[in-house]
Every structure is written in structure tokens, then in C-alpha cells.
Amino acid sequence: MRLKDRIALIIGAARGIGAGIAARFVEEGAQIVIADREPAGEATASRLGGRFLQIDIAQKADAERAVATALEQCGQLDILVQNAGIYPWTLIENIEPEEWDSVLAVNLKGTYLAARAALAPMKAQRSGRMIFTSSITGPRVTSPGHGHYSASKAGINGFIKAAALEFAPYGITVNGVEPGNILTEGVKEARSAAFIQSMQDMIPLGRLGTPRDVANAVLFLASDDAAYITGTTIVVDGGQTLPEGADFRLNPD
Ligand SMILES: NC(=O)c1ccc[n+]([C@@H]2O[C@H](COP(=O)([O-])OP(=O)(O)OC[C@H]3O[C@@H](n4cnc5c(N)ncnc54)[C@H](O)[C@@H]3O)[C@@H](O)[C@H]2O)c1
């Protein structure tokens, strides 16, 4: 029960990695509030015994409403997870400014808006945990079609450092996770089977990740065990970013 009686707001948790984080937090004793733009979040929250709020994290008023609702309904806010993200596949030559803005608005601006909204209550409490879902795509590697997405996720890593420094005097830690390729509903919708297979072929541990793989790292960062860790990210990629080239497999036999 590593999160016993902690109150966690998890944004972008109707499904996929966020739902995995929410489930893992509940297993460890947390009370959860799920905020997502999809009404399907209601069913996820009720399955997990949590609360649901429909928001668009790209909107300042919605970020503030999510934090206010968690405070009203649960009395405090101990953990903020901003996991909402979108990943359209478009070559840079075809990215229109509107699409660029929409990706940056959810992934990067949404991260700053969530952090800013949660700061006031955490500052007053003199404690808090903020955890943001970045990616290996952008901070470490990339592939064609990910120009806006890569920029947004590399931006999150920079923001994590800046926020960690500014919020440290209030006892608030700020960290992130960098998932590799995690098999979620979103990935199945937005990426071809050939793309998914090509990623699997590059993963030394031989499989795509699961939401639970990422959730375990987020849980660690949210727990007391990570009290002295701030301003950093944990890569959760099955070793995908390790190989120098495609010919990396050893035959263990
Ligand atoms: N799946 C992967 O391989 C992978 C790898 C690296 C990073 N990530 C990141 O992990 C996060 C989750 O990815 P996933 O694969 O689970 O995606 P997903 O599409 O399955 O789930 C994303 C959730 O975020 C919600 N959401 C999207 N835009 C929102 C908004 N504006 N406001 C509120 N909620 C919003 C969606 O409704 C959905 O419930 C994203 O930030 C993604 O960039 C995923």
C-alpha cells in the first residue's frame, strides 16, 4: 500500500497508459480522480472506484477545474499525473500549423497548465508529486512522421527540469517517464501493424511494453521511495534505445 490515502489526479486516463497508472495507484491504496476529454473515462473511473471529470487539458480553465474538483471532492491533492497526449503521424512537409498547434497544445501546453494549476495547493501543503508522461521519441530517438510529437516530448523534459527547480523549495518533486513502444488502444488506432512490428524488432527484451510496465515506474516516482528524486525521467523501453545498429541480437543458445 505504497500510496495509502494519497489523492491522485490523473489526466488522460480513460484508457491506455493513463488507465494503467490509475489502476496501479488504486492497488496501492490511492484515491483517484481521472480527468479526460473522452466520456469513456467515466466507466474507467467507476471500474476503479474513482471519480471522473471531463476536461480538455489544453484549456487553462479545464486544468484549473480538474485541480479544484480533486480538492473539493477529496480534500487535498498529493499526486498530479499529466499523461494526456496525442500522436498523429505526419511528415513535417505536411504538418499544417493547426496540426502543429494541436499537438503542442495537448502534450506540452497541457503539461504546463496542469503543473501550474496543481502548484497552489501543493505549495500550501508544502508537499506534492508531479509526474509527466514524456517519451523516448523526441528526448532520445525519433522516426519520420514525428516532428511535432518529438518537439512536444523533448519540451516536456525541459519543463520537468525547470519546474523541479522552481518547486523544490515547497517540497514538491517533478519527474517524468519516457515510455518506449507501449501497446495501447491509441497505438493500435494511430500506427500501422508494420510500424508496430518494426518497433518490436528493435526491442532487446523482445516485446512491446504494457501500460503496467509504465505504471510501475510512475508508481515509484509517486511513492515515498522517490522522495529524493526530482528533475529527471525514467526510460521504460525494454532496452529499445540501446542498440547502435539493427544487428544487435545474440543467440543465447
Ligand atoms: N503508447 C506508446 O507507445 C507511448 C510511447 C511513449 C509515450 N506515450 C505517451 O503516453 C501517453 C498515453 O499514450 P497512450 O498510448 O496510452 O494513448 P491513448 O490514446 O491510448 O490514451 C490517451 C488518453 O489521453 C486522453 N486525451 C487526449 N487528449 C486529451 C486532452 N486534450 N485532454 C484530456 N485528455 C486527453 C485520451 O482521451 C486518452 O484517454 C501520451 O502522452 C503518449 O504520448 C505513449
Image (cartoon, rainbow, N blue to C red):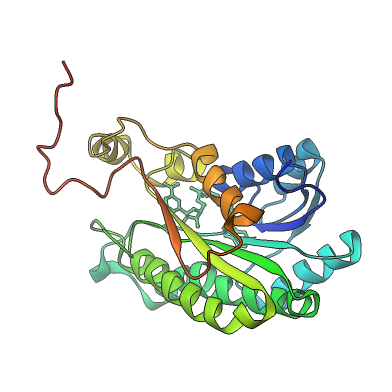
The answer to whether any part of residue 226 appears in the image is: yes
Q: Residue furthest top?
A: 253
| Residue 192 placement, left or right of 118 | left
The residue drawn where x is 77% and y is 69% is 67
Quadrant in which the C terminus appears:
top left
The answer to whether any part of residue 12 appears in the image is: no
Give 127 or 23, whichever is nearer the viewer: 127
Give 86 or 168, whichever is nearer the viewer: 168
Quadrant in which the N terminus appears:
top right
Q: Quadrant of residue 28?
A: top right
Q: State how many labels appear.
A: 0
Q: Quadrant of residue 117?
A: bottom right
The residue drawn where x is 50% and y is 45% is 214
The residue drawn where x is 89% and y is 64% is 75
Q: Position of residue 53 (x, y in %)?
A: 78, 58
Placement of 47 over or under 80, stated as above or below: above
Q: Position of residue 99 (x, y in %)?
A: 42, 70
The residue drawn where x is 46% and y is 68% is 103
Q: Position of residue 208 (x, y in %)?
A: 38, 35
Q: Quadrant of residue 158?
A: bottom left
Q: Position of residue 153 (x, y in %)?
A: 41, 66
